[in-house]
Amino acid sequence: MKTRTLCTAAAVLAGMMTSVAMGQQIPTRPQLNTILGSNQILEDFESFVVPINTGMILNVSTMDSTTIANSQGPGLVEPCCKYVDPSGVQLQWNGNGYQGLSTKTLLGFGSNPMIEIHYPFPGVHAMGVDVLGFTSFGYQGAAAFWDANGNFLGSFPFSVPGGPTPTFIGYQNIGSVGIGMVQIRGSAGWAWSPILDNHGYGRTGGNLRVTGTCPGPITISWVGATPSRPMRILFSPTTGNCVVPNGPCAGTRLGLGPCGGVTVVWSGTTGGLGSGNLNATVGPAACLRWLQMIVVEPPGNCPPCTTTNVAQIP
């Protein structure tokens, strides 16, 4: 990405954090998409090579992006997440068409009907996953959630009809410490867990807002970012899905694009409260164009960078 100064700006790092809802169910996938935006990591379980109409038992009971299973891998699943059979026995990867399912899926095939999803500290702010059942094997299940410090957040029941129709399970815990573990339980007495597909998860980078009149003075404000972290405000004539090609945020997906049109218009920090204002004067070329903030998270965080929503210059 090129660096270009479009306006004269002065940072005023002040303001209050807005209140946010903690530990809440997310009822639909569109709501999950709205919460996470371009921060969402999506695992569709399509990477493992398994024959159609086949369920392949794996040689592992836990799997993350570094795992090698049945001589395949690493990179079988997306990073910042681990799938666990809590009985310590094994996972199973289902091929297209297996037992009436129309897509590849993952389940725990251990000694209890349960599968867990683990996220590394400091956890994720929101997650959602499709849960399925084999044809003619509908069931009543329950999902439970803990934060990344091991504190219980909440739980709720769900119903799965069986067959190719999924049930969506979603949850959010917006804060410095997010969701650390999800436990998904199926019918008592079964030797297999609920079946997972289309798992979306991630951390938010805060909320960005632009007010004022263009051309002329505008205020760019943000809240809810990780405090005291390096950040950049990016400008683009259009929205898109540029993937940052290099640097500490390489691989981060933006809501701006194409990449050749994305420029850095301000570099600084998020402020001690993760909130701040940037006053600027812009010309006609900036009107109705788009801004987004990208934040470099603390070392060891997964993912290494987060982004805000995309905001339009009025």
Image: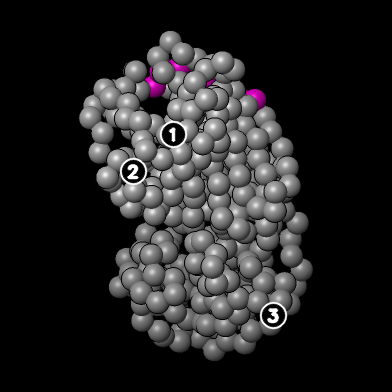
Indicate left or right for 219 with 54 as reference: right
Q: How busy is the neighbourhood of tag 3: few (under 14 within 10 Å), some, or many (20 plus)?
A: some
Distance Cα–Cα, label 3 vs label 1: 50 Å
Residue reaching furthest top?
136
Mark 2 residue element: loop
The x and y percentages for residue 39 are 49, 57
**Residue 247 colored in magenta in the image:** no
Going by the numbered disc 2, the residue's amino acid type is: Ala
The residue to which callout 3 is attached is: 13
Where, quadrant-wise, is the N terminus in this rendering? Answer: bottom left
Residue 163 in picture, x, y percent from top left: 40, 18
Range drawn in magenta = 157-164
Q: Position of residue 62 (x, y in %)?
A: 46, 43
Quarter location, residue 140: top right
Q: Position of residue 66 (x, y in %)?
A: 39, 54
Please give the name of the residue rendered at 74% of the width and 65% of the height, measured from the top-left corner: 17
Could you say which is closer to the camera, residue 304 or residue 223? 304
Dot label at residue 268 = none
